[in-house]
Image (cartoon, rainbow, N blue to C red):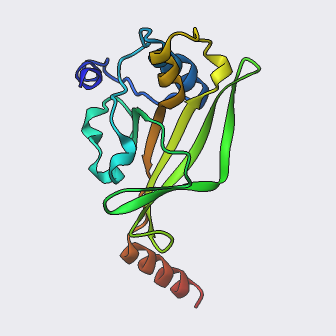
């Protein structure tokens, strides 16, 4: 992928970890409009086609541990998106607005990944934050159907893996805490 190839040439010490408004304003909006990005570090993939552990995580370079960014097509406007071995479920909080310079520039929603079938799947340590633009923030000519479609469907996704404590470590800490009570 073009984005992945250039991403390996980032300066020493560089870490890509934008805040939400920077991601929408300086990356997603520019990608939709076909403009040059500040840094070509975000690869494009279909995030919702498979479980997060099967995504091409190595294509994203220059980020912080357990955090990856991708451009993708918008998930269906459904609360559950099925994959071959699990599903993504939208968090109950719904969609949150993203503000920049007193304007709503986009929206963020969080999806957790579950193994198995809904509604009885097991929650994993994988999470996706999906960022979309506010249609009013990206003015486009009505006749530009290609860009209109990108505006409607292109999103930026931040994939996170929150590593949980190993079970043996939890048991050890529990025993140590019980021993301290004596």
**Image spot of residue 61 (x, y percent):** 30, 30
**Image spot of residue 5 (x, y percent):** 22, 22
Q: In the rendered view, does 126 fall on the left or right side of 148?
A: left
The quarter of the image holding the N terminus is top left
Name which quarter of the figure residue 40 lies in. top left
**Image spot of residue 109 (x, y percent):** 59, 44
Residue drawn where x is 47% and y is 51% of the image: 127
Q: In the rendered view, does 92 fall on the left or right side of 73?
A: right
Residue drawn where x is 61% and y is 26% of the image: 21
Q: Is residue 93 visible?
A: yes
Q: Height in image: 74 above or below 42? A: below
**Image spot of residue 123 (x, y percent):** 46, 66
Q: Residue furthest right?
A: 102
Q: Height in image: 113 above or below 4? A: below
Q: In the rendered view, does 47 fall on the left or right side of 123?
A: left
The quarter of the image holding the C terminus is bottom right
Q: Height in image: 141 above or below 125? A: above
């Amino acid at each position: 992928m073009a984005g992945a190839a250039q991403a390996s040439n980032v300066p020493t010490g560089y870490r890509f970890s934008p805040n939400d408004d920077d991601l929408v304003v300086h990356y997603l909006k520019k990608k939709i409009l076909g403009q040059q990005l500040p840094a070509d570090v975000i690869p494009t993939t279909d995030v919702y086609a498979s479980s997060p552990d099967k995504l091409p995580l190595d294509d994203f370079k220059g980020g912080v541990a357990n955090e990856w960014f991708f451009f993708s097509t918008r998930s269906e406007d459904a609360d559950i998106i099925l994959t071959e071995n699990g599903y993504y479920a939208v968090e109950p909080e719904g969609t949150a607005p993203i503000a920049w310079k007193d304007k709503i520039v986009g929206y963020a929603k969080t999806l957790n990944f579950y193994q198995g079938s809904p509604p009885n799947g097991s929650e994993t340590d994988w999470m996706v934050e999906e960022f979309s633009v506010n249609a009013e923030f990206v003015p486009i000519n009505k006749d530009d159907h290609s860009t209109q479609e990108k505006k409607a469907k292109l999103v930026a996704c931040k994939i996170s893996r929150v590593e949980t404590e190993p079970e043996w470590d939890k048991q050890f800490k529990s025993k140590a805490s019980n021993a301290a009570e004596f």
